[in-house]
Image: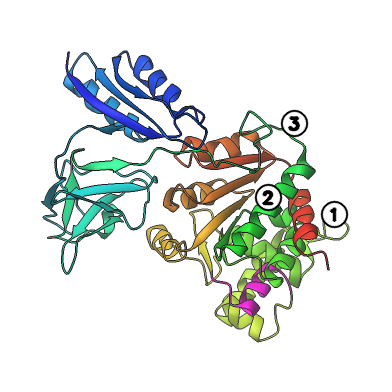
Amino acid sequence: MPAELVEVEGHIIDSLILAKILDLIVGAGADYHMVDVRIGRTNTDPSKVRLEVRADDEGDLVALLEELQVHGANLVGELDAVLEPCTDDGVLPAGFYATTNLPTWVRLGGRWYPVENPEMDCALVVTTVPAPVVRTVPMHRVIAGERVVTGREGVRVDAPERPHGATPFEFMASEVSSEKPKSLLVAEVAGRLRANRQRGRRLLVVCGPAVIHTGAGPDLARLVRAGWVDVLFAGNGFAAHDLEANVLGTSLGVSVDAGTPTEGGHSNHLRVINEIRRWGSIEAAVRGGYVTDGVMYECVQRGVPFVLGGSVRDDGPLPDVRTDVVAAVDEMRQHVAGVGVALMLASTLHAVATGNILPAGVETYCVDINQAVVTKLADRGSRQALGIVTDVGLFVRDLAARLDPS
């Protein structure tokens, strides 16, 4: 049977990483033999396990090894990474290494070099002048002649770990539950945001239209005004209804004060989008006095950058919306440096898109009334995401009261 030696190191026992790796091997119909096991004596000591993994054929083994490396199981060996040049712009060599969002290292000339910007589903591009640098690059941005890591040799990833010490959710066994005490969770998240600010890290907020529909718009605007939000990602719908709520007092034609439909209200968002297009941009409409309140207003006033990614279902869209979705994600990438916490509020598509470009070290909280939404982010590769199943309006209102009690 084809076999390879792999090893995994870190807090792999208490984080259940080793158990997950063994489950994956057995679930794939493969076999393993523990060659070496070193268990840390305390919860601060790392453990290290070396496994021989065997599969029925080479193809099955390769596929399994790729899946295991996502969990920090690396090939044992002292070989340098293999580099191949791109022959065309936007096209990778056939055997390119597909990245995870975990901290990653590449061996070049007998030394291990860290990858500058961990991001999943990218290639590893290596430059050596004036000194070796390894960075992740999405497929569409590689340039002919750039050297790309191929195969699995000479690549290591650090095992994903749960934070140690006082952290949110440590008192609950499951990551996602509709039965968790919400007030306590909000208090814990607020504490993490304060700690994030003290570390000099940035807060990224990702919003869906339900933030406005549930009445959380003024509370989120309050957080922006108080300086808690450093960057905002959303779509045309969120921005359009935020502007509608603050220009016409409705969201999807429903009064934000009375909660009742208004006559002809179904077209209100279209009329507001049309007027913003007349102004030329959201910023121009704010500066001109057409928009005087709301989340987008506060972002403009405080200079908080925002990226609005478009979709095929958008009305209008607003002039600030990036209708080229590839360009939208590229612009999002420009704003994730320095982000320590990401708060996903009632968003599925934009939350998944954002999770795809964030390193695993970014604390990520996904808030939605639908439990399937908060689990989807983790299922798509953002394993650091923790879910809170609750009404987003109540969550943001409580969070704003805790962070900005004035």
Q: CA distance from mark 2 to mark 1?
A: 29 Å
Question: Which part of the image, by quadrant, shows the N terminus?
Answer: top left
19 sits to left or right of 129: right
- Residue 58 vs residue 18, the one in the foreground: 18
Tag 3 residue: 179
> Which callout, 2 or 1, points at the residue further toward the start of the chain?
2
How far across and down, in percent of the image, does residue 267 sit?
70, 62
Q: CA distance from mark 3 to mark 2?
A: 17 Å
Magenta stretch, residue numbers: 293-305
Q: Residue furthest bottom?
A: 288
Q: Nearer the viewer, mark 2 or mark 1?
A: 2
Q: Is residue 253 visible?
A: no
Q: Residue furthest front?
A: 41
Q: Characterize the local packing of mark 3: few (<14), some (14-19) or many (20 or more) Cα atoms within 10 angstroms.
A: few
Q: Residue at x 62, y 53 (%)?
A: 208
How far across and down, in percent of the image, does residue 303 sit?
58, 77
> Which callout, 3 or 1, points at the residue further toward the start of the chain?
3
- Residue 52 vs residue 251, the one in the foreground: 52
Tag 1 residue: 259
Q: Characterize the local packing of mark 1: few (<14), some (14-19) or many (20 or more) Cα atoms within 10 angstroms.
A: some
Q: Secondary structure at mark 3?
A: loop
Q: CA distance from mark 3 to mark 1?
A: 28 Å
How far across and down, in percent of the image, does residue 164 sit?
56, 41
In this rendering, is residue 333 above or below 110?
A: below
Q: Residue at x 77, y 37 (%)?
A: 181
User: Label 2 is placed on what type of residue?
Assistant: Val
Tag 2 residue: 189
Marker disc for residue 100: none
Question: Which part of the image, by quadrant, shows the C terminus?
Answer: bottom right
User: Label 3 is placed on what type of residue?
Assistant: Glu
